[in-house]
Image: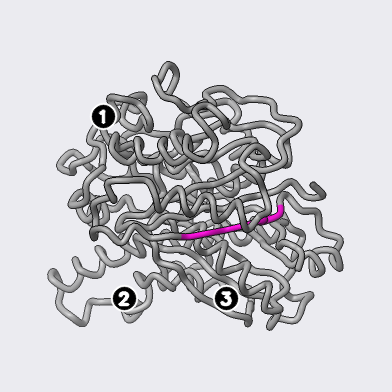
Amino acid sequence: MMNPVITGIGVVAPTGIGVAEHWQQTLTRTCRLGPVEGYDASGLPIGVVGQVPGFDPAERTDSKLRVQTDRWTWYALEATRLALADAALDPADHDPYRLAVVTASASGGNEFGQREIHALWGQGPRAVSAYQSIGWFYAASSGQISIKEQLKGSCGVIVSDAAGGLDALAAAGRSIRRGVGAVVVGGTEAPLSPYAIVCQSSQPGLSTGKDPATAYRPFAADATGHVPGEGGAMLIMESPGFAAERGATAYAEVAGTAATHDAHHPTDPAPDHRQLARALRTALDRAGCAPDEVGAVFADGAGDPRLDRLEEAAIDEVFGPGGVAVCVPKTMVGRLCSGGAALDVAWAALALRHGVLPPSVNLDGVATSLDLVTESRPAPELRHVVVLARGVGGFNAAAVLRRPGT
């Protein structure tokens, strides 16, 4: 069976809303990390974050949905709308049972939950919204997208922290191989409410740096952790036949995916890189792609020196030291929980479309065996790219994207 293809991209991220703004901000190396805006974060264990600029819920989300849902779902609904428009796919024109949705979620509706907890303790149980039971829930975005767009095929959510975006991509591929025509797939997050920040602060790896230029520097010897961010991307993934019937143009083929687990500790990484390297090799094998055919790797980029060394070792083992270009464009936006890998897939698909590798920021002069891309790099012969992602608890995932027609 031919590989599924990505035909639409919807981005709601610190780099912008919509593909055009996102790509333009990327190529100009616009770092969107900065102090928390919207509330006083001086008492929280965090210095800078990546926030989505210019997102007005009143303009982008129906009022009835706003009272039922959290910000992360608002982002997902808007990213889905943008992705469907980008793919020129109107669900109303197709059998709804051939259209599906799968999202990734790790943080859930923290802002919604925080507000309802305040209501509970400040005013009593009767002040709690009837939507509390669904507004925070991990599957809320999948359910709301399915209802709004009338997607009546399979509907699900993947919870594997930052690996979730790639695991959702794999789940979408399985649905397509079982006969679904198109899947709305991806992930968005909004983990920047005070409650969400406090939850994250109990885990290792969160940077408390206050300088956007130094707070998040994956693969640097002096890395201090990661900066959290919000947003993500939704993608339209189709069977080649369904896309051909519509006359759709593909950004990329999803040539191979794989997932492994360290099975080591609830939060600490394994002491070696074997399972990450195995996910990478398995994805390449499933894609029928040799390491020397890969033009770039979009790294997970934990920002934690120990995790970074493990990822560096896995990439070096498979490709050889300096054997492949390594992109970490998330240095512009921070780590977006389950939205991060979905956004990396969007970046990778755009790199294949335009023949340009997106830059990393704040990594100039970093001493590493990796060939870090720190400026936009022309890559007209780019044919295959790999996206890597890891989640707290030992999740590893890899995906191989191929330029259509290669």
Q: Amino acid at mark 2?
A: Gln
In the rendered structure, the answer to whether residue 228 lies left or right of residue 123 reads right
Give x and y (percent) for residue 144. 51, 73
Cα distance, mark 3 to mark 2? 19 Å
Q: Which residues are magenta?
A: 253-259
Element marked by disc 3: helix
In this rendered view, identify the residue nearer to me: 34 or 259.
259
Give x and y (percent) for residue 199. 22, 56
Could you tell me which residue is drawn at 39 percent across and 62 percent down?
160
Say if 388 sits above or below 330 in the image: below
What residue did someone put label 2 on?
Answer: 132
Give x and y (percent) for residue 96. 70, 81
Q: Earlier in the sequence, mark 1 or mark 2?
A: 2
Q: Earlier in the sequence, mark 1 or mark 3?
A: 3
Element marked by disc 2: helix
Q: Which mark is residue 210?
A: 1
In the rendered structure, the answer to whether residue 59 lies left or right of residue 136 reads right
Q: Earlier in the sequence, mark 3 or mark 2?
A: 2
- Residues under numbered marks 1 and 3 in contact, where contact means CB atoms less than 8 Å apart: no
In the rendered structure, the answer to whether residue 308 lies left or right of residue 404 reads left
Q: Which mark is residue 146?
A: 3
Could you tell me which residue is drawn at 18 percent across and 52 percent down?
202
Could you tell me which residue is drawn at 27 percent across and 55 percent down?
196
Badge 2, how many Cα within 10 Å: few under 14, some, many 20+? Answer: some
Cα distance, mark 1 to mark 2? 34 Å
Say if 319 sits above or below 93 in the image: above
Q: Amino acid at mark 1?
A: Lys
- Residues under numbered marks 1 and 2 in contact, where contact means CB atoms less than 8 Å apart: no
Q: Amino acid at mark 3?
A: Ser
